[in-house]
Image (spheres, rainbow, N blue to C red):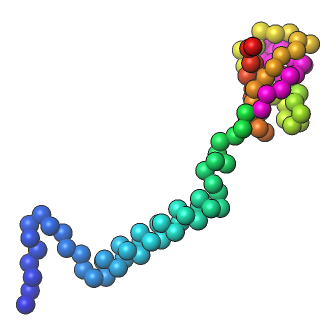
Amino acid sequence: MVETAVHGKMQLSSSQQQGLVFGCAFLAAGIVLSTIVFPFWHLIREDVFEDVVILTNDNGTCYVETIDAVPKIIENCDLTAGDEVTIKFGKDLAWATIVTP
């Protein structure tokens, strides 16, 4: 006896259903493992605040040295070498912003 499909309804064979279940289980396992191995909060860097001295100003781009030994670049800077400021930067990133009190 042959069954005919109802118009507008899709029927999956047994092997297609098993393949769909396997694919969904594989995807779910991948998401769980990637969350355990590489948690999403590692994408968000912590902000660091530090008092620094401007080393040089090169046409509006200031350079400072910080405790993490990564030189920081400050764009649109109108300060001169030797000025003391408080900056905010992401941990281990090369750019910073000046924090105004």
Q: Position of residue 12 (x, y in %)?
A: 24, 75
Position of 66 relative to 5 (above/below): above
Q: Is residue 73 magenta?
A: no
53 drawn magenta: yes
Quick one: 5 or 61, which is closer to the camera? 5
Identity of the residue drawn at 87% across and 30% down: 66
Residue stretch in magenta: 48-63
Q: Quadrant of residue 39?
A: bottom right
Dividing the picture into quarters, in which one does residue 25 lie? bottom left
Q: Residue at x 78, y 23 (%)?
A: 87
Instruction: Identify the main secondary structure in magenta.
Output: strand
- Horizontal side of 32 relative to 2 (left or right) equals right
Where is 67 relative to 76, above or below?
Answer: below
Confirm whether residue 56 shows in the render.
Answer: no
Residue 75 seen from this side: yes
Q: Tell me the quarter of the image containing the C terminus.
A: top right
43 or 12, nearer to the observer: 43
In depth, the one of 59 and 27 nearer the eye is 27
Instruction: Answer left or right for 37 relative to 96.
Output: left
Q: x%, y% of residue 94?
A: 77, 33
Figure quadrant of residue 61: top right
Quarter containing the N terminus: bottom left
Question: Relative to 92, does residue 85 appear above or below in the rendering?
Answer: above
* Residue farthest to the front, as pictured: 101
Q: Residue at x 61, y 50 (%)?
A: 40
Q: Residue furthest bottom?
A: 1
